[in-house]
């Protein structure tokens, strides 16, 4: 265990919240595709939204957490590490291990890794952008923590059709992400679709909405190919919730387990497009409309059950899981892929990225000849009343979320992916059936950790949740 704090009995809740734009004024590289994209304009600002929580028992601190939702595709390990370092001396009484960052997985947010591409031209370099982002996030985190006041919390479950399974299965058993469906060999979509919307609300002492954390099991990538900075559908969700509940409301958008989910329509595309045209909405606006409707319906009910005193506990676990071993055949396939791209011009950013993709796979195979691969994972498990929030650092396939939901003793289990990295080898974590089907998101190049590690993640998450709910099975 890396850190633990909290009380099983009811504790007074102190709450702070803040938001900050992390959008630079200059053009920047956008992360989310193999090819380089330099932003031409800002379609909507990318934000960092912060929630600071402290439980107090008899006036003394008994538990704490800072949650930060960030409009980026993923969080490099050094970004969270450096933010914790910056805040260590700044936030009196706060254990920075109790802070986590989570990515919304927008594909039109800033690139954070300098080595992601080989040429950024005249755009703002990632090595220049990241300190800019860290400065702003540190200020927002400090504002939220230092501004915490007594308040209340409420939570509930809504539903909205946002994500669809994106892995298309064919008669021969193979699977392809975004594969063709208008073919006689189409047999269906590979996995389940999760339409839950977890809602966690916080109010001030006057019962005015202060902040909300909303988890949707779908990445925010409806405009994933744009050459524009965009927070995708979360921008419209935030603007709508602010218009209804006050401009100062802070909205943390979290991506639930969604490694095999996408906001793209996979079936009934023509009918969906027609309805969007009739409503005069873009796809991301339509998805935001659904999420906001789910929030409104949930908030209307749960606001009658606001709690000022709740059992509160926050545990941080760091552990290792086995990495995915490559077979000799998978090595040969990766070797061939690398050789094919090695013949091409690296000035093409897509070629450069694919070569890195294959090369890292070859390096893994060579390393496993010397020792078994392992990956370090950090998870946060936060109990508030009978709700529990649990993070993971992967693009986690929904199968694993089902296993956690099915066995969790909590009254409501809120899962957040792409959060709190402990190393930079977190990508897709595919299910057993996905590995059998193959294809992008399930091949070794996409998956440093496989189903064996995924099940260990499930068991460790459940073990930690159960420890926070003593007496429940």
Image (tube, helix red, strand yellow):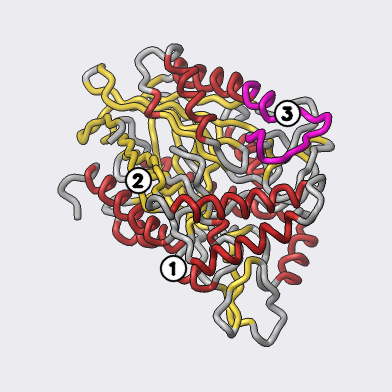
- Determine the secondary structure under disc 2: strand
Q: Which of the 4 quarters of the picture holds residue 130?
A: top right
In the rendered image, which residue does mark 1 sit on? 432
CA separation in Å, label 2 and label 1: 20 Å
Q: Is 445 in front, or is 410?
A: 445
CA separation in Å, label 3 and label 1: 39 Å
Mark 2 / mark 3, whichever is N-terminal: 3
Give the magenta-colored segment's residue range. 113-132
Q: Is 128 in front, or is 408?
A: 128
Q: Is residue 68 left or right of residue 183?
A: left
In the rendered image, which residue does mark 3 sit on? 125
Magenta-drawn stretch contains 188: no
Relative to 156, does residue 177 appear above or below in the rendering?
Answer: below
Residue at 44 percent across and 57 percent down: it is: 324
Residue at 28 percent across and 20 percent down: it is: 61
Q: Residue furthest bottom?
A: 184
Residue 210 visible in the picture: no
In the rendered image, which residue does mark 2 sit on? 320
Q: Which label belongs to residue 366?
A: none
Count the labels in the image.
Answer: 3
Q: x, y (%) of residue 249?
A: 56, 30
Q: Is residue 82 left or right of residue 408?
A: right
Mark 1 and mark 3 in contact (Cβ < 8 Å)?
no
Residue 357 visible in the picture: yes
Q: Nearer the viewer, mark 2 or mark 1?
A: 2
Q: x, y (%) of residue 276?
A: 75, 60
Mark 2 / mark 1, whichever is N-terminal: 2
Q: Is residue 156 left or right of residue 188?
A: left
Q: Residues within 10 Å of mark 1 (few under 14, many from 20)?
A: some
Q: x, y (%) of residue 300?
A: 48, 46
Magenta-drawn stretch contains 124: yes
């Amino acid at each position: 265990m890396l850190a633990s704090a909290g009380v099983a009995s009811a504790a007074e809740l102190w709450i702070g919240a803040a938001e900050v734009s992390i959008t630079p004024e200059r053009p920047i590289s956008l992360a989310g595709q193999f090819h380089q994209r330099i932003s031409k304009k800002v379609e909507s600002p990318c934000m960092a939204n912060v929630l600071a929580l402290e439980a107090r028992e008899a006036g003394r601190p008994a538990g704490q957490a800072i949650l930060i939702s960030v409009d980026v595709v993923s969080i490099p390990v050094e970004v969270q590490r450096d933010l914790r370092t910056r805040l260590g001396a700044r936030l009196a009484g706060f254990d920075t291990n109790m802070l986590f960052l989570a990515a919304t997985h927008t594909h039109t947010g800033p690139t954070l890794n300098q080595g992601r591409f080989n040429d950024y031209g005249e755009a703002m370099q990632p090595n220049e952008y990241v300190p800019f982002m860290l400065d702003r996030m540190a200020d927002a985190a400090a504002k939220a923590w230092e501004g915490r006041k007594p308040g209340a919390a409420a939570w509930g479950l809504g539903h909205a059709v946002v994500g669809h399974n994106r892995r298309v299965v064919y008669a021969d058993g193979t699977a392809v992400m975004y594969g063709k469906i208008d073919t006689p060999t189409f047999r269906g979509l590979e996995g389940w679709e999760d339409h839950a919307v977890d809602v966690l609300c916080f109010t001030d002492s006057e019962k005015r909405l202060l902040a909300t954390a909303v988890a949707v099991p779908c990445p925010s990538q409806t405009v994933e190919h744009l050459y524009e900075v965009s927070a995708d559908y979360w921008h419209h969700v935030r603007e709508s919730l602010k218009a209804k509940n006050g401009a100062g409301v802070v909205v943390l958008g979290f991506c639930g387990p969604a490694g095999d989910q996408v906001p793209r329509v996979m079936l009934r595309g023509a009918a969906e497009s027609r309805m969007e045209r009739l409503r005069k909405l873009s796809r991301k606006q339509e998805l935001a409309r659904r999420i906001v409707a789910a929030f409104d319906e949930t908030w209307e009910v749960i606001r009658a059950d606001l709690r000022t005193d709740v059992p509160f506990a926050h545990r941080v676990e760091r552990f290792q899981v086995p990495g995915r071993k490559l077979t000799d055949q998978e090595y040969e396939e990766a070797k061939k892929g690398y050789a094919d791209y090695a013949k091409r011009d690296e000035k093409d950013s897509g070629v450069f990225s694919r070569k890195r993709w294959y090369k890292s796979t070859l390096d893994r195979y060579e390393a496993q000849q010397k020792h078994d691969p392992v990956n370090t994972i950090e998870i946060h498990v936060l109990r508030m009343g009978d709700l529990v929030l649990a993070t993971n650092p992967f693009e986690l396939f929904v199968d694993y979320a089902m296993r956690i939901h099915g066995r969790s003793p909590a009254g409501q289990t809120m899962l957040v992916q792409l959060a709190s990295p402990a190393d930079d080898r977190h990508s897709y974590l595919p299910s057993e059936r996905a590995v059998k089907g193959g294809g992008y998101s399930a091949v070794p190049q996409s998956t440093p950790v496989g189903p064996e590690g995924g099940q260990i993640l499930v068991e460790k998450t459940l073990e930690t949740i159960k420890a926070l709910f003593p007496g429940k099975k």
